[in-house]
Image: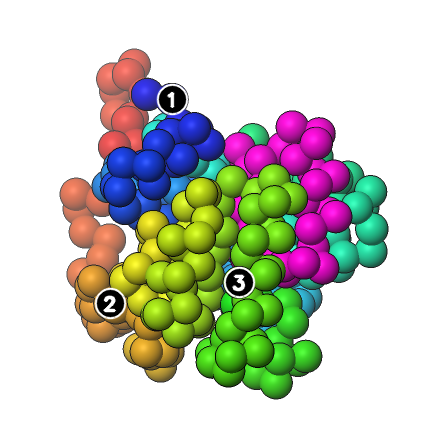
Amino acid sequence: MARKTVLDLLKMKAGSQKIAMVTAYDYTMARIADAAGVDMVLVGDSVGMVIQGQPDTLAVTLDDMVYHGRCVARGLQNAHLVVDLPFMTYQVSPAQALESSGRLVKETGCQSVKLEGGERSAPAIEAITRAGIPVVGHVGLTPQSVHALGGWRVQGRSEADAAQLIRDAEAVQAAGAFCVVLEMVPAELAAEVTARLEVPTIGIGAGVGCDGQVLVCNDLLGLNSDFAPRFVRRFAELEAPAKSAFEAYVAAVRDGSFPAEEHSFHRTRSAKVARLY
């Protein structure tokens, strides 16, 4: 099957069908998510925190996104692939944004790119979409602006902030984005934005009124018990069994029970080459 297109996702909003998006950063996770029926896979700059162990997303490079985007693309058959533009690869100028986006499309095989910011990012979105590259916008809490925002805080709570967030979302749509991520936004405000926009909204910490939802793969799988923000639901608790499996492996190596006879190769008179599996 072909990957879902921009038109497919627009039709899902028109038909009131919810869009399921997850992040992935490698081939294995992408393959599993795709087989499960996920609609969109995002190679997020959250790779800096989830995979690299960084305190935020700011150190992630375009080379990082190209590498992880390539890995994820190889695991997808059906899901629409989005790759993030990392910090300072699109903010300098629309020309820089277009060049960075073109590299992501050419070198990863992604179908769209994502960037943060509302009105301030509209010129970059216009330049990218004019070149025929689909764009996903991102407003509300924008992690690349974490220092300016004063930390990981809900956005749009005051009347003035809510009005600005609406303007940002509408500016992103007007600039040509086909989808908008709403992060850590009051549920009522996210529902209002969703009703105003013709393009789908994807929520994370934005309530039930969005056209779809996105979660980080490691969060929904319960692979980090120390990270438990309010907007995350763990659909599995895999950290403990994974740790138990590693402990069992260590014990088996130390007591000599692994490898056993069935895991070993021997010299043979047969001309056949020994099989690995």
Closer to the camera in the image, 24 or 174: 174
Marks 1 and 2 in Cβ contact (< 8 Å): no
Residue depth check, mark 3 versus mark 1: number of the one nearer the observer: 3
Report helix, strand or loop for mark 1: loop
Rendered position, 147 above or below 252? below
Q: Residue furthest bottom?
A: 150
Look at label 2 and name its amino acid.
Arg
Q: Which residue is mark 2?
A: 234
At x 38% / y 53%, what residue is drawn?
Answer: 195
Find out whether residue 229 is within the magenta segment: no
State the residue position of label 1: 2
Viewer-proximal residue among 248 and 211? 211
The residue tagged 3 is 166
Start-end of magenta stretch: 110-138
Residue 21 drawn at (x, y percent): 36, 49
* Rendered-image quadrant of the C terminus: top left
Residue 111 in magenta stretch = yes
Q: Quadrant of residue 206?
A: bottom left
Q: Is tag 3's residue or tag 1's residue first in the polypeptide sequence?
A: 1
Q: Residue furthest toward the top?
A: 271
Please state the horizontal and vertical placement of residue 110, each as a whole percent of the image.
54, 35
Question: In the depicted view, which residue is nearer to us: 23 or 230?
Answer: 230
**Rendered image quadrant of residue 45:** bottom right
Position of 4 relative to 58 (above/below) = above
Please determine whether, in this image, residue 64 is positioned above or below residue 56.
above
Amino acid carrying mark 1 in the image: Ala
